[in-house]
Image (tube, helix red, strand yellow):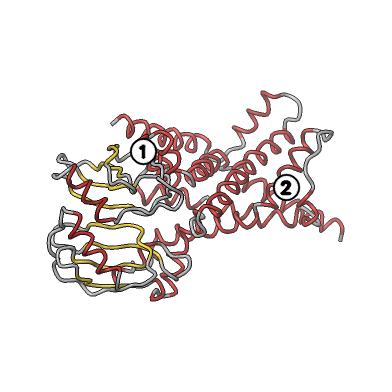
Amino acid sequence: MASASKSRRRLWFSLHSWAGMKLSLLFFFVSLTGTIAVYAYEVDWLFTPAMRVQAPSPDAERLPAGTQLAAALQQHPNWTPSFFHVNLPGYMASELIAKDEEGELRRVYINPYTAEVQGVADWFNAHRFLRQAHRHLMLPLKWGLTIVALLSIPLLLSMISAFPIFKRWWRGFFKLPQSTDPPRRWWGNLHRWLGLWSLPFILIIGLTSFWYLIEQWGAAAPSAASALPPPPEAGPLPREAAPLNRALEAALAQWPGYRLESLFFRGDNQPVVLQGQDSALLVRPRTNILLLDPAAGEVLGQFRGEQLTAHQRIAEAADPLHFGTFGGQPTRFLWFLWGLMLTLLSASGVWIYALRLAPKAATSRWRTLWRGQLLRWPQLALVLTCLTLVAISFSG
């Protein structure tokens, strides 16, 4: 019996080592970019002075969205608005994404407290880099997302196989590595501690990533807007603050408690789509929508998150859970912390593998790590291709 138990444990250990080691180069890159992406807007804020604002007082309120939008449209009268973020953190400018005269997407930053246009930036920024590198490695979406989402399988296998390996695992929550431990034991204790404390995160990331894979290959849920009948043509978008504010106020008056997050401009003679949040849990703003005729101030359609089907609720919950945005700054910080732990968990597991197979020579360890990768050259090529495409995007 003891021999059979030991044999089973050895099989679980082999599975755990294989799942955690063979694609660790690619997994480390995806995990690291995803962790930093939690604060992608803040990264851009550091490098883009036009994004920075300071509220005149702690209780200062933003100016109406129509006032801010009008200021940007009057500054750039020949630009075509595409998307307007109006509810970013109080230290950030509102952001209008618009096409310039050449058809290039640009970002216009408006001070939400003064309606001053503070500057313009290119479409591709740190947020886009982190988002696209993490989501699909800058490759065509279908294939890049498939490659990244497939990593959910070894991630979940690593989690499941850890339980049979570590007996009485629940005792390890407060068992930190000691300075007197030999290297292999020190890294092993750190690896176990990181894994235990990040268990909820590993499960959430693994399941949501696997859901993205399912969505990509045929199980995508219909959007909330698809449930609405085709709206009639809408009038042209006003370029002055007063009519814009009247139209927005008339629309929002029909939905008490609605928190406007963004405006999506669908094109000429199309209604403006208001996106926001209300009482539905774990949904993206795009599920709570108002279709607005901006010229007449008339609501042409409305959809609430509570109206979603079970399939749509699962699909809409994936992003808030994957990125930790559902609870504001507290959950964003927790997701960032857990992301760091997952990234370190991957690195520490790989290092333990190297210490076990090459305990003495450092050069042998690095050689062991490299040779232990599955499809090591394709993995390296994917990472380098992604970084090259990023460099081209920034230089262009």
Q: Position of residue 304 (x, y in %)?
A: 36, 72
Closer to us: 49 or 380? 49
Instruction: Indicate the quadrant containing the C terminus: top left, top right, bottom left or bottom right.
Output: top left
Residue at image coords 40%, 65%: 277
Closer to us: 7 or 58? 58
Read off the residue under disc 1.
125
Seen as rendered, the residue at the extreme right is 2
Residue at image coords 73%, 57%: 163
Which mark, by number, is residue 193?
2
Image vertical order of residue 178 relative to residue 143, above or below: above
Closer to us: 101 or 30? 101
Q: Nearer the viewer, mark 2 or mark 1?
A: 1
- Which residue type does callout 2 highlight? Trp
Residue at image coords 16%, 53%: 239
Estimate how packed mark 2 is, as few (under 14), some (14 to 19) or many (20 or more) residues with alpha carbons within 10 Å: many
Image vertical order of residue 8 relative to residue 287, above or below: above
What SS does tag 2 mark?
Answer: helix
- Which residue type does callout 1 highlight? Asn
Residue at image coords 82%, 58%: 4
Q: Position of residue 3 (x, y in %)?
A: 85, 55
Image vertical order of residue 358 relative to residue 273, above or below: above
Side of 337 where 275 appears, left or right: left
What SS does tag 1 mark?
Answer: loop
Estimate how packed mark 1 is, as few (under 14), some (14 to 19) or many (20 or more) residues with alpha carbons within 10 Å: many
Side of 371 where 80 appears, left or right: left
Closer to us: 62 or 393? 62
Which mark, by number, is residue 227?
none
> Rounded to the nearest whole Å, what is the CA distance between mark 2 and mark 1?
36 Å
